[in-house]
Amino acid sequence: MTTTPLYQIGTFAAGNRLLDPDQRSVQSDQDRTNAITSGHRACRGCGEALAARVVLDAASRATKGRLVTVNATGCLEVFSTPYPESAWQLPWLHSLFGNAAAVASGTAAALRATGRDDIRVVAQAGDGGTVDIGMGCLSGMFERNDDVLFVCYDNQGYMNTGVQRSGATPPAASTATTRPVGTSAGNAFGTGKSLPLIAMAHEIPYVATATVADLHDLEAKVVKAMSMHGARYLHVLVPCPLGWGSPSAETIQIARLATRCGLFPVFEAEHGAVTGVTRIRQPVPVTDYLERQSRFAHLFAGAGRPDVVTALQDRADRNIARYGLLTEETP
Amino acid sequence: MLRQIEGSRAVADTVALCRPAVVAAYPISPQTHIVEGLSDLVTAGDLAPCEYLLVESEFGALSACIGASAAGARTYTATSSQGLLFMAEALPNASGLGLPIVMTVANRALGAPINIWNDHSDALSQRDAGWLQLFASSNQEAVDLHVQAFALAERLSLPVMVCMDGFVLTHAMEEIDVPDQETVDAFLPAFAPRQWLDPDDPVTIGAMVGPGQFTEVKYLAARHQLAALDDVAEVAAEFESTFGRASGGLLQPYRTEDAEVVLVAMGSVLGTAADVVDGLRDDGIAAGVLGITCYRPWPHDELHDALRGIPRAVVVNRAIAVGAGSILGRDVRLTAPPTTEVHDVVMGLGGRPVTRAGLRQLVLDVLHGRLEPGALHFVDLDETIAASELARDEEVAVP
C-alpha cells in the first residue's frame, strides 16, 4: 500500500481510487456505517470528530456491525449528544469522565456472560479521560486483558473545559494553566507521560499510535485491533484548532508535521514489543510544526526562545533514535 | 434450608441464587467475605454463567456494573465505608441512567480517624444518590432483602443498596434460612432490561441534558423514586407469600400499640431494641420499637401514621451530620405528627456496642424527663476524653 509510485499522488488520500477496492478507505464506501453523522456540534476542523468517525466506521466494518461503544466525558460526548439529539448510529454509552475503561470492561463481561460475545466493545476518550483521570480504570482493563479496544483521541489538553494542561500536553505548550507568563516558556519540560509506553508495559496484545493525517493507517490499525482479542490500545493524535491555535483547514497538515518532525512517533507494538514503525519519509525540523500553532507562538515572538526550540528538537531526535523513525530510504 | 452459617456467606450464596451475570468488586473490610464467597462460587462453576471482574478500585467496580447493566446483564457489587465514597461519582450516574444494579453495603464508619467498625455513616452519606436503601435488621433479613432487591431493581429500573451492619451481621455465625434455587427462580424472573446496547436497535445512553430538560428529568426521577414505596411494600408482600416469612417492607413496628415511647432505629440494633422493649413491657412500661427498613425512598406517610398517637419517639442515630445534627433523627422530626415529641440520640459510632442496658437506660431517661427534646445527645460519651482534648485545644490556641 505504501509503494513509491502511489506515494507521489498521496497514499494518505481517503478515497484513493487508484487503490484496489479492498484497500480503499471505509470512508470511500457508500455503505459505510457513518457511525457519527453530520450535524454534530464539533468545531470546524476538529481532529477528534474525524478520527472518531474513521475509527468507528472501520471497527463497524471489521465486526460486521456487531459493535457497541463506550465514551468518556469530553468534547466528543458533548458535541455528539445534546439531548434530544444524538449523532451516534451505533449503540453508545456515556457514564463518567474517568471510568470509560471500566464501563467497557463491564460491557464486554456482560456480553460474554450472556452469550452475545459476537458483539465487540470499543471505548473512546480524550487524553484527559485516558492518561489522567481515567488511568486507574484503564490500567485495570489492561492488566485483566479485558476484550476491549480503547481509543484515545489525543489533542494534548483539556479542550472541552477551556484548554487546560493535561498529562499529555507537550512541553512548552501554552494552555490556560501553563501560560508563558513571567519567565515561563509554557508547559514544563520533564513532565507528562506516554500512555502507549505505559500500555506496552502491561504487555497487552496490541498497542498502536496513529494520526488523522494518515487515515488509511488509522483504519488498518483499527481493523488489525478488531481481529484480535483482549485489551488493545490505540492512541490517535488529533489536532484541535481551538486549543492549538491553528487554522481549521490545517488539521491534517499539522498532524502530518507532528509525525514528520518526530515529536509524535507512529508505531505498533504487540505484547510489549514494538513490531512496526511508520518511517519518516520527508523529515522536517520541529519549527515547521511549532510555528503553525499559536500555543507555541511565545517561542518565536521577539527574541524568541531558541533554547526551548532546541530542547523540543532534542525530544524529536530522541524519538527518531528510539523508534528508528529515519532510515536510509529517506530521501 | 436452615444452615449454621456466617452472614456474609449466606448473602454470597443468596446473591448467587439470584443468578447475576456480572459481579465486579474490590475488597474492603467488612465486605470481604461476601465477595470472597462469590469469587469461590464463580471459580468453581457453581455460579454460571457469570463473569467475576477483579477490578482495581470501587470506582472501577461500580463502573463495570454500569457497563454490564447497560449491556443487559444482571449485575452485583458490594462495598463498605471509604469504598462506597470512592464510588460516589458513579452512584448518581447509575441511578440517573436507570440501571438496576444491586449492591450490598456492609456498613462501616468513615475516616478520619480510620475505623473499620460498624455504623451507618457510609450509607447515609449517599442517601441522596438516587438509590433505594434497604436496611437489614438481621442476617435472615439481609438474605431476604437481597432476593427482594433484585426484583425491585429490575421492576423499577433503579439501583438498590442492601445495607447490613458490618461485623455485627457480616461476621456473625448463626442459623439462617438460605432459600433454594427453585423458589428464588420462581420469585425472580430472568432479567429483561428496558433497553440495552443492541447493535440491531442502537440507543444512545448517557446524553448531555441542558437547562431545557434537566429539571424535568430530575422531577420524573423524584416521582419515580417516591412511587417505589408501593413497590417495596408489594415486593415484600409477594416475598412473604412465596417464602412464608415476613421480611423487608417499609417499616417494622414492634409492640407499638398504646406505646408511650418508641425507639426508632435501622439495622441490627432493632433486635436488641426488641429485647429491651420486652423487658420494659414486663415492668409495666409501654415501650415499642419502630424499625425503618426502607430508608430511601423515605416512607413519610407510613411513618407519620405509625407515630400517630405515640407521645415520644427516641431516634437512635448511628451516623451524624457534623455541623448540623443527626440525619435519621431530622428525617423523623420532619415526619412525625406534632403530637409526637422526638428525642435525638447518637449511639454506636465506629463499632461502639449498642447494649440492652444502654437502650433501656435511654428509654427510662426519656420517660423521666432527663433527656431534653430538640437537642442531639451523645449517649455513653466519655466526658474525660472529651474534656482533656478540649483543654489541650485551649493550651495550643493561637492568641
Image (tube, coloured by chain):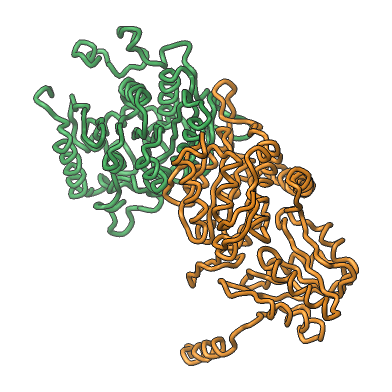
Chain colours: A green, B orange
In the rendered view, does B372 fall on the left or right side of A211? right
What's the residue at 50%, 67% (across, down)?
A: B116
- Quarter of the image where one finds residue B304: bottom right
What's the residue at 41%, 45% (across, down)?
A: A128
Furthest toward the left, the residue is A328
- Quarter of the image where one finds residue A50: top left
Pick the front one: A329 or B31: B31
Rendering coords of residue B177 (x, y %) = 65, 52
Pick the front one: A291 or B374: B374
Rendering coords of residue B282 (x, y %) = 82, 77
What's the residue at 9%, 25% (across, down)?
A: A328
Q: Is residue A87 above or below residue B277?
A: above
Q: Is residue B175 above or below residue A283?
A: below
Rendering coords of residue B119 (x, y %) = 60, 67
Rendering coords of residue A313 (x, y %) = 18, 42
In the rendered view, does A205 fall on the left or right side of A116? left
Pick the front one: B149 or A231: B149
Residue A75 in view in this figure: no
What's the residue at 24%, 12% (across, down)?
A: A6
In the rendered view, does A9 fall on the left or right side of A48? left
Q: Is residue B28 above or below residue B277?
A: above
Residue B158 in view in this figure: yes
The mark total stands at 0
Pick the front one: A128 or A103: A103
